[in-house]
Image (cartoon, helix red, strand yellow):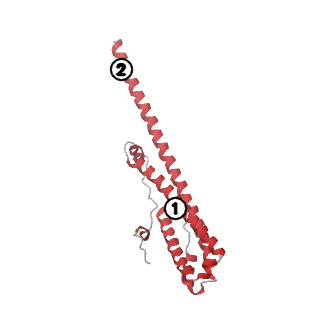
Amino acid sequence: MDDVLKIILAIVGVILVLLLFFAVWYISVLNDLRRMKVKIDESESSIDVALTKRFDLLTKMVSATKGYAKHEQETLEKVIAMRQPGSTASIKEKSEFANEITRGLNSLNVVVEQYPDLKANTTFLKLQDASMEVEENLQAARRFYNSNVRIYNQKVVVFPSNFVAKRRGFAERDFFEAEEAKRADVKFDF
């Protein structure tokens, strides 16, 4: 009888160790998923900051350009009329806003090409340099966001962490994607 009791206690002990190991693993994966969500939210906020800076800079560029391009009023009014999405907007809405701003910048560049005096204006040149810096920051923020989303989405869909993710309601997040025009091949027309 003593041997049977020892075997039963050993089996119960192994089961308890396995349950403890499973509980620790489950909590660890759950905490990783939560940390990743926070990191994604933080990186999305970085995109918001860069978009806000871009919008503010574009507004200043429009103001600087107005005096030089009065008859391009429609383009300028369209750029000014753009409204920045709120912080609760989805990543898709933010992406669409970024695409609108890009189209506005492209229109503004056409205006600049038509007015050589504007290109020579030191204020405008400083704004252009600042615009390039903001664009680089925005690209970095997008890459950082997409990197975090990639890592998180892998955890959500790959076994065994997907076991925890499904049970706790973690869903895949959307990537910040480039607009269709930027995916096309660049054509050089000399």
Indicate whether 20 appears above or below 134: above
What residue is rendered at 66% in x and 75% in y?
A: 122
* Element under disc 1: helix
Q: Nearer the viewer, residue 185 or 152?
A: 185
Q: Nearer the viewer, residue 111 or 57?
A: 111
Answer few, some or many: residues within 10 Å of disc 2's Cα (few below 14, many 20 plus, some between 14 and 19).
Answer: few
Residue 87 visible in the current orientation: no
Amino acid identity at mark 1: Gln
Answer few, some or many: residues within 10 Å of disc 1's Cα (few below 14, many 20 plus, some between 14 and 19).
Answer: some
- Pointer 1: what residue? 139
- Pointer 2: what residue? 8
Residue 116 visible in the current orientation: yes
Query: In the image, residue 96 lies at what x, y percent?
Result: 48, 68
Measured in 3D between alpha carbons, the distance from the residue under mark 1 to the one under mark 2, in whole angstroms, is 61 Å
Q: Nearer the viewer, residue 185 or 182?
A: 185
What residue is rendered at 52% in x and 51% in y?
A: 39
Indicate whether 129 appears above or below 35: below
Q: Quadrant of residue 47?
A: bottom right
